[in-house]
Image (tube, rainbow, N blue to C red):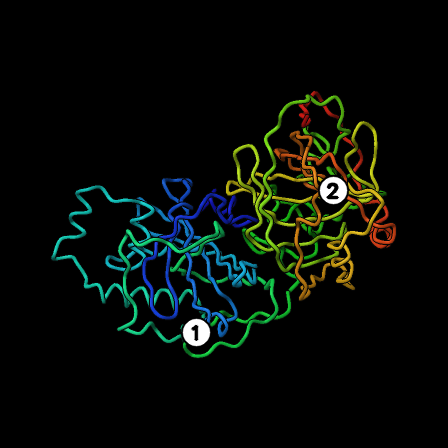
Amino acid sequence: MGKFSAGLLCAVCCLPLQAADWLVVAKDKLRSVEIDRGSVMESDGGSRVAWGRIVLTEAQADKAGYKTLRALNRYDCRTRSFTLVKRVYLSADDRVLREENVDASNPSVVRPGTVDERFLNEICPLPASETAKKTSPASKRSLQEIADEAGRRAAAAGSTEGSERPFRRAELRLVKDEAPAASAKPAAPASAAAHGEITAKPPLNPEPKAASQEAPTPPVYRAAPPQYTPRPVAPRAPKAPASHAVAAAPVAHNPHAHWSYEGETGPEFWASLNPANSACSRGSRQSPIDIRDGIRVEQEELVFDYKPSYFRIVDNGHTIQVNYGSGSMLTVMGRNYELQQFHFHRPSEERVGGRAFAMVAHLVHKDLEGRLAVVAVLIEEGAANPLIQTLWNNLPLEKNEEYTPKASIRMSELLPARLDYYSYMGSLTTPPCTEGVLWLVLKQPMSLSREQIEIFSRFYSNNARPLQAQKGRVIKESR
């Protein structure tokens, strides 16, 4: 999977923003199996990625504890195989309940006459000669055989135990291509052909309701183990999270190389702590900067599609970080970025025309190819913020111990009314200081109460990297 995995499993696995084009592949009285033809995207090596989903009836959703199971698959058109990348469980109102990244290195070959083949043919259409060969009388399987196969696939997608009852033979039926997809939301799809081993990732939701024998029963997860960071490419050591490195860091580094904001491990020594941190001293596009002399232009509008979600909060030794559920998107400059996490600095790391702010929230996003986009929300003292209060109410008691509260949050409560912004290319502001990060600094600040600011100060009174040289970079400013 190579480049694809590095760019996808870190953070990633975006839920599509374009209008969904759901095709119902199979259905019965309990659920339907669908593929989103509008989500198909090109990937490396001639492969493509696409979403599918299993939608349960209301009765089955009450039993299973979720309404929709969405999954992202990577399809290799050349070898006619696929690999499951991610599952996302959602409630009836499209709230993310749980997400599971799947580190599956062995693709599954698509067998003729299966629902997987139906999916693959939508993603990678066969040449006319091959299509005729596939549909010749000698190679056809009966509709009932295909329906039975779809039932087994769909049941497997909702369970890691394989203990679910298969679809009833008389109930499941294939649906013709022209059947419309009944979906009003462009939300994240999921795959009916959900195979592969699930990585150990804690849930974003409380323990789901117990399911009956007829309901697809998702695995039950309880405590959020501290040995991971969200959306990893591969497991890594738990005690050295970097505030911006939400997933695997773009440059491998020694997790035991301690760094801080002062003394002999402070910012001026970051590069000497680990060779992987060389960009911290040698880079030409480092962040933060004092934003001034920007070119005033009509910048493209920032489009936020933030969904309410459960969250995980951790004091990682450098900041308070909040890891967010899948499916919340930012669209800018022709790219879709998924929100990974957000965290805080005091005082603000960036300045605007020399002015510093009490704090800043950095909202870290990543696209399918691994590119980072960080939205900086400047914070000044004023009225209390309800989202921040929810976070502070659930602050962990120990460092590096993630806590998953039952409360959910709406990220829209952390955005100002006006979305004018400054944009420039920079870097992570923490080791390894990787460059190539798109920075979007909102011009209108948000407010926190003095008490809310002082609570963060009890944890971190100064966790801001010093300003870096602008070095002739272009800075654009919304008119």
* Residue corresponding to mark 1: 215
* Quadrant assignment, res 309: bottom right
Q: Nearer the viewer, residue 260 or 31?
A: 31
In which quadrant will I find the C terminus? Answer: top right
Can see residue 211? yes
**Mark 1: secondary structure:** loop
**Mark 2: secondary structure:** helix
Q: Residue furthest left?
A: 138
Q: What type is the residue that disc 1 sits on?
A: Ala
In the image: residue 207, left or right of residue 469 = left
User: Which disc number belongs to residue 273?
Assistant: 2
Residue appearing at x 51%, y 40% in the figure: 369
Residue appearing at x 35%, y 47% in the figure: 76
Q: Does the CB distance between marks 2 and 1 fall below 8 Å?
A: no
* Image location of residue 401, percent across then percent down: 71, 62
Residue appearing at x 43%, y 74% in the figure: 215
Q: Residue furthest bottom?
A: 213
